[in-house]
Amino acid sequence: MKIIMTILSFFILTSLFSQKMEKTEKLLDSLNIDFNLTPNQIIKNNLFGTNIVWAGKLESIDISNMKDSLQIFFYCKHFNFDTVSKRLIIDKQMKLKYKGSGSFIVSIISSEMTMKDANELKNTFERQAPYILTIGKAVDIEKKFKKNYVNTMSYTFYTFRK
């Protein structure tokens, strides 16, 4: 029985992963994206509202307690792509250079996460310092930690290891 449950779980997870990757592929197909556009270029040329695909290293996390939910802010240092394509993004295989140009924020709102859970997530992520890839839109500037961060509205994002 345990083997059947394991196999069934595997097929369900595979199906969910496949659906998410298919949605990511459709999303990337629908957007006109310059993979070389950086947060600093967005600020310098006032390109807010532009679709972006950015990768960066997690620097810090803030948690804001809202009325019925929590908002978690992921502050990231941008890294330029060395090798990137739609397929590499979907497969989490893109290559990054060791430099970037600027910083950005990815945020999520959760009405189901407790403050304890959010703090555990924060501690785990800050300890592991993963990289984050976001597909979305550059929205505005937020000044934090003596830096200008480009706020993003993410259509989707994920963490990965470099």
Image (cartoon, helix red, strand yellow):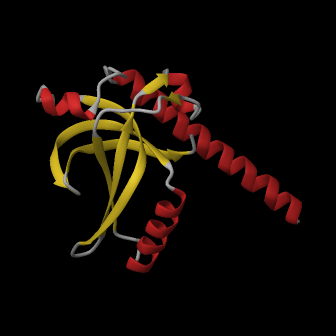
Residue 42, image x, y percentages = 19, 30
Residue 95, image x, y percentages = 54, 28
Q: Residue furthest bottom?
A: 116
Q: Is residue 6 left or right of residue 114?
A: right
Q: Is residue 127 left or right of residue 5?
A: left
In this rendering, the answer to whether 82 lies above or below 10 is above
Q: Residue at x 12, y 25 (%)?
A: 45
Front-lying residue, 67 or 142: 142
Q: Residue at x 28, y 38 (%)?
A: 102
Front-lying residue, 22 or 108: 108
Q: Residue furthest left?
A: 46
In this rendering, the answer to whether 15 lies above or below 2 is above
Front-lying residue, 156 or 34: 34
Residue 49 appears in the rendering: no
- Report the number of numbered marks: 0
Q: Residue at x 81, y 53 (%)?
A: 7
Query: Which image quarter holds the C terminus?
Result: top right
Residue 12, image x, y percentages = 68, 50
Residue 37, image x, y percentages = 29, 24
Q: Is residue 131 left or right of residue 63?
A: right
In this rendering, the answer to whether 88 lies above or below 3 is above
Res 44 → quadrant: top left
Res 94 → quadrant: top right
Q: Residue at x 48, y 73 (%)?
A: 120
Query: Which image quarter holds the N terminus?
Result: bottom right
Residue 34 appears in the rendering: yes
